[in-house]
Image (cartoon, rainbow, N blue to C red):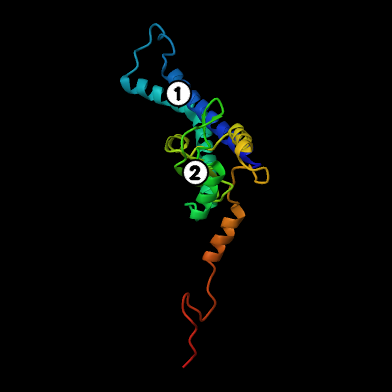
């Protein structure tokens, strides 16, 4: 899966940017709520309403810029999520043939990591999508990894890192025949989903009804 590095680091960058914006927003609010200093001698004390209005104005002015940045980042995240949904493979479960071939390739042992890059030693119980199905991963043999119940729960729907992909492919060279591919990970193309959607909503020809044969005029 050639584009895994770009996908992984782009989403990691978005998460870090979101965390930094949240910190910026919190600091801006706390700074705006801090007292600005002592009142000038001889001036009448402000009323509670004026003090509250001044605090609100200070907070709004302080969070304007980070707030806009958070909104823009939220829109970017929504667009990425929508594209992931459009990429989803219409078939989520692996076929019996895919499970049989995937388990035989793994020798019935979990292919996930148990720590320090080593292969998990527990028996494989599940067939998991290496690139998550919810993020557009294909339900194919190339995207199939044998996993035990514990590793399957721990992985969840997280996108694996390029280093995890390289380590898994390196471990597969030890138990996969030389003539068989060791590459792992596959994502559905966006264009293919668009074609399927276009075909599903294509208008029917005049005089034809879906699922029925045209009738001759009487």
Q: Is 146 or 160 nearer to us in this picture?
A: 146
| Circle 1 crowding by C-alpha within 10 Å: few under 14, some 14–19, many from 20 | some
Residue 137 in view here: no
Q: Which residue is painted at 48% across and 36% down in the image?
A: 155
Label 2, secondary structure: give it.
strand
Picture disc at residue 183: none
Q: Which residue is painted at 54% across and 77% down in the image?
A: 205
Label 1, secondary structure: give it.
helix
Instruction: Report the mark closest to the observer, 2 or 1.
Output: 2
56 horizontally vs 131: left or right:
left
x, y percent for residue 141: 57, 49
Residue that carries the numbered disc 2 in the rendered image: 128
Q: Earlier in the sequence, mark 2 or mark 1?
A: 1
Q: Which residue is painted at 56% across and 46% down in the image?
A: 143
56 horizontally vs 188: left or right:
left
Figure check: 19 above or below 71: above
10 horizontally vs 33: left or right:
right
């Amino acid at each position: 899966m050639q584009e895994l590095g770009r996908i992984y680091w782009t989403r990691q960058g978005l998460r870090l940017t979101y965390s930094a914006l949240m910190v910026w927003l919190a600091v801006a609010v706390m700074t705006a709520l801090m007292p600005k200093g002592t009142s000038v001698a001889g001036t009448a004390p402000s009323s509670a309403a004026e003090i509250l209005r001044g605090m609100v104005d200070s907070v709004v002015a302080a969070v304007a810029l980070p707030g806009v940045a958070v909104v823009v980042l939220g829109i970017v995240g929504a667009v990425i999520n929508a594209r992931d949904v459009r990429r989803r493979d219409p078939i989520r479960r692996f076929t019996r043939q895919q499970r049989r071939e995937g388990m035989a390739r793994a020798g019935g042992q979990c292919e996930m990591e148990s720590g320090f890059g080593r292969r998990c030693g527990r028996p494989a119980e599940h067939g998991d999508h290496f690139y998550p199905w919810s993020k557009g991963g294909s339900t194919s043999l190339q995207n199939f990894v044998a996993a035990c119940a514990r590793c399957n729960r721990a992985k969840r729907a997280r996108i694996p890192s390029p280093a995890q992909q390289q380590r898994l492919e390196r471990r597969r060279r030890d138990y996969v025949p030389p003539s068989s591919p060791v590459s792992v990970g596959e994502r559905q193309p966006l264009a293919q989903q668009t074609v399927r959607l276009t075909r599903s909503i294509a208008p029917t020809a005049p005089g034809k009804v879906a699922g029925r044969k045209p009738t001759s005029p009487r």
